[in-house]
Amino acid sequence: MEVSASFDLHGHTQESAWSALPAFLIREQARGSRCVIVITGKGKLGEGVLRRNFLHWLDMPEARRLVSGYAQAHPRHGGKGAFYVFIRRR
């Protein structure tokens, strides 16, 4: 599947990431994107706050209307610090 866009959470606070990520996914859904990359970073010992919150957010009802699934990115796309996000059709 072709990756149509990426969103980097580096530099975001938890609060700004919480509002910017849904806006990005809504915009990409409207554009007809099917797969995007979200870069969370790894954090210390692979348990960064943004990474953990991102995975938690994907389990929430607000995300389920936008996202059909996700997978850890290939190393060339960021590996453990990034995720492919599969966007639902409108």
Image: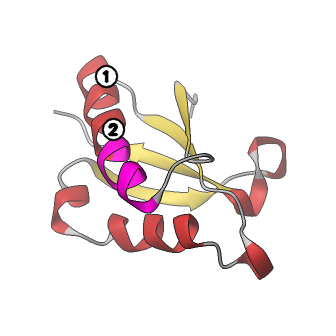
Q: Secondary structure at mark 1?
A: loop
Decide if residue 90 is on the left or right side of residue 14: left
Q: Position of residue 66 (x, y in %)?
A: 24, 47
Neighbours of disc 2 within 10 Å: few (<14), some (14-19), many (20+): many
Q: Is residue 61 above or below residue 90?
A: below
Residue 11 falls within the magenta-colored stretch: no
Q: Which residue matches tag 2?
A: 25
Dividing the picture into quadrants, the one containing residue 81 is: bottom right
At x 29%, y 26%, the residue is 27
Decide if residue 65 is on the left or right side of residue 81: left
Query: Could you tell me what secondary structure mostly forms the magenta stretch?
Result: helix
Q: Is residue 52 above or below residue 83?
A: below
Nearer to us of marks 1 and 2 is 2
Dividing the picture into quadrants, the one containing residue 54 is: bottom left
Dividing the picture into quadrants, the one containing residue 68 is: bottom left
Front-most of 64 and 14? 14
Q: Is residue 77 above or below residue 50?
A: above
The magenta region covers 14-21
